[in-house]
Image (cartoon, coloured by chain):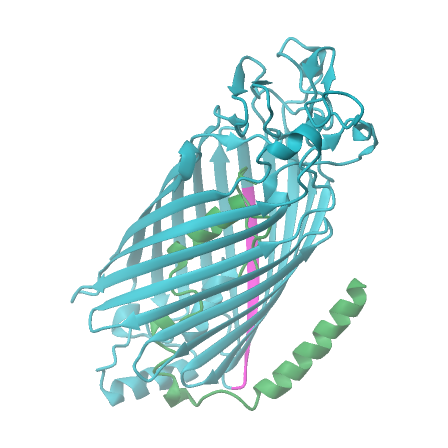
Amino acid sequence: MSKHFMLMGVIGITFLITGCSEMGVKAWERDVLAQQEMSLINEPVESSLNDHVYFSKEASSGGQGFGGGGCGCN
Amino acid sequence: MVVKGLEVAVVAVTKTMKKNHELAKVLAAASCALIGSLSTAHAEESWDVDSAFLLYSESDGRVSAAEPVISATKNYDSETRLNVKLVADTLTGASANGATPSDEAQTFTSPSGNGTYTAAVGDQPLDDTFRDTRVALSSNWNAPINRDWAYGVGGYVSKEHDYQSLGVSSSVSRYLNQKNTTLTLGLGAANDTINPEGGVPTGLFQVPESASSSEFAQRDDSESKSIMDAVFGLTQVVNRNTIMQFNYSINTSSGYLTDPYKILSVIDDDSTGNNYGGNYTVNNRNLYLYEKRPDSRLKQSLYWQTKHQFDNNDILDVSYRYMFDDWGITSHTIDAKYRFRFDHQYLEPQLRWYSQSKADFYHRYLDSSAYTEVDFASADYRLGDLDTYTIGLRYGYQFADETEFYTRFSLYHQESSGDDGYGKLTSQELYPGLDAAMLMIGYKF
């Protein structure tokens, strides 16, 4: 089951990368994406405080980064 | 965290670029990004500090927490940075112990075995001996290897009076398609030690009356668990205003995964008796068992995030996570933020919805005719069917010297559900909701 899942993942990612080569911008078009506000985690302190609350209150964690841990709250 | 840091590096070719910057500066910064090394006016060797304070408070006098955090980042250049973060938190209040409410007052042995606490008729049994202080220190280092590769390493240590954790992480990223595509592989490992108040109780064993019982005498002082993480990420620049990320992550935990402070009620399921649906008693004492979870867990998740900036400079940030594990839990999380940007201020409404299905061994209570047959059981509502909602609003003001004040207020609501029991139990509230308010105040300098 998980092998199938891994295989699908590898195939999916290959397709994604192939498709991705069509996307993107030139180096001089990075003005917007270069803004700190456009980084994927632009407020790391807020994200980590939220992750800590959700980690201690729900059965899921991680996804965006590592799965969390380091606390006896769950 | 290293992965997060690297994702930031992908687009952070310059620290701040206001919309009124001249085109020449834009071109200069972008060209520098292309060759993979950049030193802007802001990328001098200075520390950027983000300090914040979170107040968390649950309704009905349950848990409240105060959590100061200080995060300092030294930027050597646009892609080389060192981050050090210190977090402390203090928790006080009462936490649900897992037992069901009852039509009779209930008395529970405290975790240490040296005292008792009670729940009145119909009240949720809450362990009010719950309090803790945690201090955590973490550090991450991110740097390029060459123009196509980058790496990160990190570590953390955290300490509570009954819990210690030590972790390391590392990641490597490969840039493709003129840095429009980034592949990242992150690996993490952690080792946690728990030394519960009163020692490690025996799973699915009756909670003794006091510390003088033989069960207490045979307890170990501590247990441990180890955690391994792997994250495979793909970040893609879609167009000038849009960036997208897909992550697949896998997390394994092994060792002691039980919550030593959680218990379960055993309910009398003899429908011919007059205690049908009431607490089952053994030797004239209500029967409560310590919970017991499997000693391994494999979690996997798929994560998708997209950020888009509109022509008016507002930013939409949307993410979705699907998680599933071998405990039978699946969950969906949708998180959305929209940042209205003004000259020196922003306002950001936030919404989050989370829904999980229960673990296979989750039971709100155990039946008296069958409790000896279970291998694992937990009544921890965090392993049950659960929906949660967060609504929040963040406001920030950016001063001329590029320091920023910000604040965020949010409300968090939980709704649990499950089977309603039988007999006397049906008149009890088995799945109370939970409301919490969070206030964060911070300053970046």
Residue B442, given in percent of the width and then of the height, sits at 28, 52
Which picture quadrant has residue B367? top right
Task: Give the chain coloured green.
Answer: A
**The chain drawn cyan is chain what?**
B
From the viewer's perspective, tell me whether residue A33 is left or right of residue B249: left
Which residue is at a point 52% across and 64% down the rendered structure image? Answer: B334
Left/right placement of residue B106 relative to residue B443 reads: right
Q: Identify the image quadrant of the N terminus of chain A.
A: bottom right
Q: Residue A43, how many percent across, how many down?
A: 38, 61
- Residue B99: percent from left, percent from top: 62, 29
- Pick the residue in front: A39 or B13: A39
Q: Which residues are magenta?
A: B166-177
Q: Considering only vertical position in the picture, is A23 above or below B76? A: below
Where residue B422 appears, as percent x and y from the top left, is 71, 34
Does the rendering let one see residue B3? yes
Observer-nearest of B138 and B223:
B223
Q: Quadrant of residue B420?
A: top right
* Residue located 72% across and 28% down the image: B203
* Residue, far left: B400
Pick the front one: B385 or B400: B385
Magenta span contains residue B437: no
Confirm whether the magenta stretch covers residue B171: yes
Q: Nearer the viewer, residue B301 or B84?
A: B301
The residue sitting at the top extreme is B212
Query: Which corner quadrant of the image does residue B197 belong to?
Result: top right
- Can residue B290 be spotted in the picture? no
Name the magenta segment's main secondary structure.
strand
